[in-house]
Amino acid sequence: MSNTITGHIRLRENKKGKTYQLVLERATVDGRRKRSYETLQVGTTKKEAEKRLREKIIELEQYGSGQPSKRSLKSWLLEFEEMYVHGKNLAPTTAASYEDAIRTYIVPVLGEVPLCELTPLAIQKWVNQISEHSPATGNPLSPKTVYNHYLCLKKALDIAVNMELLRENPTLKVTLPRQRKYHCEVYSDEQIRQLLDSVHGTDLELPIEMEISLGLRRGELLGLKFGQIDFEKQTLTIAENIVSVRGKNHIKEPKTDAGRRTVRVNSVLIKKLLRQRADYRSRKLQMGADFHDTDLVFCKKNGEAYNADYFSRKFRRHLKRHNLPHMRFHDLRHICASVHLEQEINPKVISKILGHSKISTTLDIYSHVMERSSQEAVDKMEAYLYDTPQKPAAKLR
């Protein structure tokens, strides 16, 4: 017996008036036919009833003998969280962001909506609402944050489609806020010199100099171990990354092969790193059992790892104390790239130093610096062709 779903409409009449009823049939395993009904609202036209019949047949073919799930989105998200977020080997930062999106941003607004009634319009309204008014703070959310929460919902509904709880994913028809391209603002040469002077003789001296020289990510710097430094070859290898999730440190490996990289270190920094290692060993001997032998280059006095967020706050406090303009610790990485570009280092080399998987990433982020380099190229060509005086390039003194 064929499993094809068939159906027809028939006119019905009740106290409220005439309407149509859908009659759908499917063959069962034992050769019988299973019949289901749906009565439409009074006033429905025959043409509308025929359209609804076609839609209903498609639904039943999509979901087998069942129906699109009437369970709430909240119910599904909690199962999705248990099955996918906790049940998969997700990075701690990704898992935490999914949990936060579900509990703080999605469920309070859309949680009670049945899955089968979750439309693109409902999700579009949700996107617009959280863009203007965060359920957590009441403040508008940035386009990037909205996008991150949207990705969580999209992933959950992708799996709902795979589990045949939905026919299609309604998030695919939603328009997201336009993301603003990030333009990093870096210190001038004079401000960089002021920063370097301000950290001289402090425990921030070496990390800041390494950041400006090598452009490490914050977690890469805090996860660096003495065992990953080759003092003879004057290189260091990036192999681990410390991230902070809800106040606790987690160790991650680089996401890409480009992220796991070996970079050269200048001789001055190598000497300072040797002194740093000697200080580490001295503290280890002095503190004995109270010392945590993590082998970390940058750590607390007792050897414990810094909390990544704490280290950023430490840096911000230093800037404020020395009346230096505010910037993120991550912006030191941008200073590194900008200085290299202005010194006319090949962008491919800079891309490798920074650990970008594609050179286009480097060029896109630092396009504003490339524009200045382009002007210098024009000036040099002018000087070459017409023997005009060449303007001196900007340099960090």
Image (tube, rainbow, N blue to C red):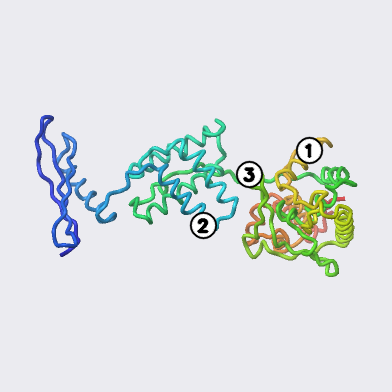
Amino acid type of disc 3? Arg
- Disc 3 + disc 2, Cβ < 8 Å: no
Q: Position of residue 133 (x, y in %)?
A: 52, 32
Amino acid type of disc 1? Arg
Q: Position of residue 2 (x, y in %)?
A: 17, 63
Q: Which residue is mark 3?
A: 246
Within 10 angstroms of label 1, few (less than 14), some, or many (20 or more) residues?
few
Q: Earlier in the sequence, mark 2 or mark 1?
A: 2
The label shown at residue 142 is none
Amino acid type of disc 2? Lys
Vertical position of residue 381 compared to residue 335: above or below: below
- Residue at point 55% right, 50% down? 95
Nearer to the camera, 181 or 395: 181
Q: Is residue 125 left or right of residue 138?
A: left
| SS of the residue under disc 3 | loop
Distance between mark 1 and mark 3 Cα atoms = 21 Å
Q: Which residue is mark 2?
A: 88
The label shown at residue 317 is 1
Nearer to the camera, 8 or 73: 73
Distance between mark 3 and mark 2 Cα atoms = 19 Å
- Residue at point 53% right, 46% down? 148
| SS of the residue under disc 2 | loop
Q: Count of labels shown?
A: 3
Q: Earlier in the sequence, mark 1 or mark 3?
A: 3
| SS of the residue under disc 1 | helix
Q: Is residue 40 left or right of residue 348?
A: left
